[in-house]
Image (cartoon, rainbow, N blue to C red):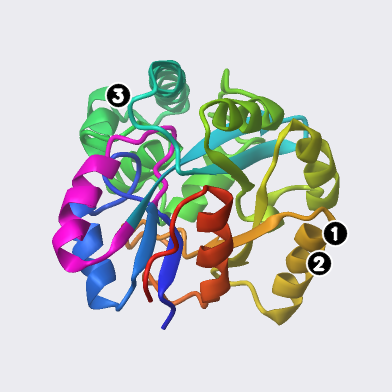
Amino acid sequence: MALLDLHLHTTASDGALRPAELVARCAAAGLRVIAITDHDSTEGVAEALAAAAPLGMTVVPGVELNTDASAGEVHILGYFVPLEDTAFQEALLSARDARLGRARQMVERLRALGMPITFERVRALAGEGAVGRPHVAQALLEAGYVSSLAEAFERYLGRDGPAYVEGSRPTPVQAVQLIRAAGGIPVLAHPSYVADPEAMVAELVPAGLAGVEVYYREYGPAEIERFRALATRYGLLLTGGTDFHGTGNWPEEEPGTVEVPWEVAETLFAAAGRPVPAR
């Protein structure tokens, strides 16, 4: 089991556990350092910080920004992002508002295709979190129109699907610049999901990219070495985590089951000018 997990989601976006519940689960797994990285939201960080304090755990305030590139969606993680920076929080709120409009349009397209789910149900499934495609997919699954979330994305909600709606989201460069301007540390998330990781890193480094998520669920030695070499070539930090959501709707690893070396915490905290937590 690892001591740190730097990619975790809560009910503030599309995770199944409240922040305090997630902290308790991570503590039970023996984790010492975790990052809350909800999509376009830091709303779960304060609760996680409060829950972690009496347990002696360290919570890194984080976020995962969804962006659009010409070859598809790209996610940018931000670490040590400010919770009270007005401009940064306004940008996140704008992104969440755009998610609402996009989800509503997807629901309308699905209804036209003969799958009359409701936007109200999608909002209810999101709870207090930021609405996203996973909630639309969950509504399809709940109504029996698909047998899995993966099928919902493959048949209807993926980029080539009939219910897909292009988002008005920032570009990867804009997301990196936003996180940098706020004083955070931007990292390319799960690079294997990017059409051309090498080209994307080369594009983002001049904008201020600081790291690459090298350790990730399903990554074997070959993938880890590939992305470690890529990060090293550009002098970037290495990060890693499970991308845990806890929904049970697709295969995923439990918090702490991705082996992330402790040196990752040391270099990340040093880059942020923060003292490294005790192991």
Badge 2 local density, few (<14 within 10 Å), some, or many (20+)? some
Quadrant of image for the C terminus: bottom left
Label 3: which residue?
A: 119
Q: Are marks 1 and 2 in contact (CB under 8 Å)?
A: yes
The reply, left or right, for residue 91 in relation to residue 192 is left
In this rendering, does residue 18 appear at all? no
Amino acid on which the number 2 mark rests in the picture: Ala
Q: Residue at x 46, y 25 (%)?
A: 106
Nearest the eye: 145 or 238: 238
Which element type, helix, strand or loop, lies under badge 1?
helix
Judged from this view, the residue extending furthest toward the bottom is 1
Judged from this view, the residue extending furthest toward the left is 54
**Which is closer to the viewer, label 3 or label 1?**
1
Q: Residue at x 35, y 36 (%)?
A: 42
Which element type, helix, strand or loop, lies under badge 2?
helix
Q: Earlier in the sequence, mark 3 or mark 2?
A: 3
Range of the magenta residues? Answer: 36-58
Whether residue 37 appears in magenta in the rendering, the answer is yes
Nearest the eye: 56 or 42: 56
Label 2: which residue?
A: 229
Q: Earlier in the sequence, mark 3 or mark 1?
A: 3
Q: x, y (%) of residue 57?
A: 27, 64
The reply, left or right, for residue 236 in relation to residue 277 is right
Label 1: which residue?
A: 233
Q: Are marks 3 and 1 in contact (CB under 8 Å)?
A: no
**Which is closer to the viewer, label 3 or label 2?**
2
Give the tally of numbered discs: 3
- 259 versus 137 height, above or below: below
Q: Residue at x 14, y 62 (%)?
A: 54
Q: x, y (%) of residue 196?
A: 82, 48
Q: x, y (%) of residue 188?
A: 65, 47
